[in-house]
Image: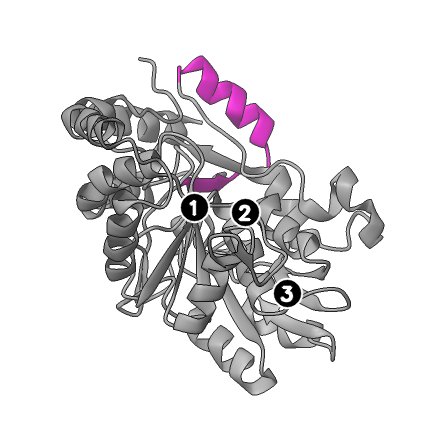
Amino acid sequence: MKIPFASFLPMEKELAYDISSAFERVYTRSCYINGMEDKNFEAAFAKYCETNYCVGVGNGLDALMLILKALGVGKGDEVIVPSNTYIATALAVTYVGAVPIFVEPDIRTFNINPLLIEEKITNKTKAIIPVHLYGQPCEMEPIMKIAREHRLYVVEDCAQAHGARYKGKKIGSFGNAAGFSFYPGKNLGALGDAGAVVTNDKELADKIRALGNYGSDYKYHHIYKGNNSRLDELQAAFLMAKLPHLDRMNSERRKIADRYLNEIKNSQILLPYVIPEVEPVWHVFSICCKKREDLEKYLANYGIGTNKHYPIPIHLQKCYQDLNLAKNELPVAENISATQLSIPIYYGMKENEVSYVIDALNKY
């Protein structure tokens, strides 16, 4: 049996008519930027995230960068980020001139450990970026408490967690603002690069919209030194076609994840821990194994696709050598990078395929 790490085919077949109709609608209307498709999706996605405002942008990295820029975070400031995340989180901080300060994750959940945040706060700290990694919500209650006590901004990185909940509340609705990515592989994915910011702060939303439109509040009137980062009409239309199906498709991912959590029984494999009162959306199902490369080859021989998220931690990437963080300074992130392996989980995955993966892992 051949099981890819991810497949879009079941979803693409199911939504083919809706996607084609979305394309025809945009093409016939001949409006490709800042039109009705964008406005309709922004309104729908804000409602979905239980927030008041949504601003479409070019991608998830831009979403985080524009939020930080709008909040006034810049040169001389520090922003707390998890040491275990995709590099875009740190790049957003770098792009506004600030310095990313890494905090180690909880090895059980892979997310930032709230107990370690305060020791990294200095008089230069301006914000915390909790990343809901792999679709697992962070522990937002203690994070928000720390932020209030130290008067820090909270910018949620929701790039992998569309629709996840923490204590009944949608992620993205806790902080000052949240950034989403709609990269094609996400639970809610466009057919190209796309992103969005959600917030309950109208002034902040207006500023982010202007910053993403060359710093312009209306045509040829520029109040900020902005960027070009907008959600185009075509991607907005595709996203609008997919959004009504997101919860149902996330539910299918949860069923697969529940089987993995309950049926994988192998002492060599560490399964993710789900904190109480959260509802993950399982963008990635992440396991850890000390013999990661061996397990990867073993599964490949079974025809099972895998991926690594992420094989080199940010502080050891060549582009961040200027932070002067040596190997072993962030041991939890380094341990995850050396042992983490993502196994197949996607909408349309069949029961017998899930069973095949479980059986292979239990025989390892």
Question: Quick check: 97 above or below 337?
Answer: below
Can you identify the residue that label 3 sits on?
Answer: 80
Q: Amino acid at mark 3?
A: Ile
The answer to which quarter of the image holds residue 339 is top right
Q: Nearer the viewer, residue 216 or 231?
A: 216
In contact (CB < 8 Å): disc 1 and disc 2? yes
Q: Which mark is drawn over residue 243? A: none
Quarter of the image that includes the C terminus: top left
Camera sees residue 295: yes
| Residue that label 1 marks | 195
Q: Quadrant of the N terminus?
A: top left
**Residue 289 shown in magenta:** yes
Say which of marks 1 and 3 sits in front.
1
| Label 1 or label 3, whichever comes before in sequence order | 3
- Name which quarter of the figure residue 140 lies in: bottom left
Q: Within 10 Å of the Cα at label 2, are there few (<14), some (14-19), or many (20+) other Cα atoms?
A: many
Q: Mark 1 to mark 3: distance in Å?
A: 22 Å
Residue type pointed to by label 1: Gly
The image position of residue 25, as x and y in percent, is: 20, 31
Query: In the picture shown, does residue 222 fall above or below 202?
Result: above
Marks 2/3: CA distance? 16 Å
Asked if marks 2 and 3 touch (Cβ < 8 Å), the reply is: no
Where does label 2 land, which residue?
A: 61
Q: Nearer the viewer, residue 40 or 170?
A: 40
How packed mark 3 is, by other alpha carbons closer than 10 Å (few <14, some 14-19, many 20 or more), is many
Looking at the rendering, the stretch of residues picked out in magenta corresponds to 284-303
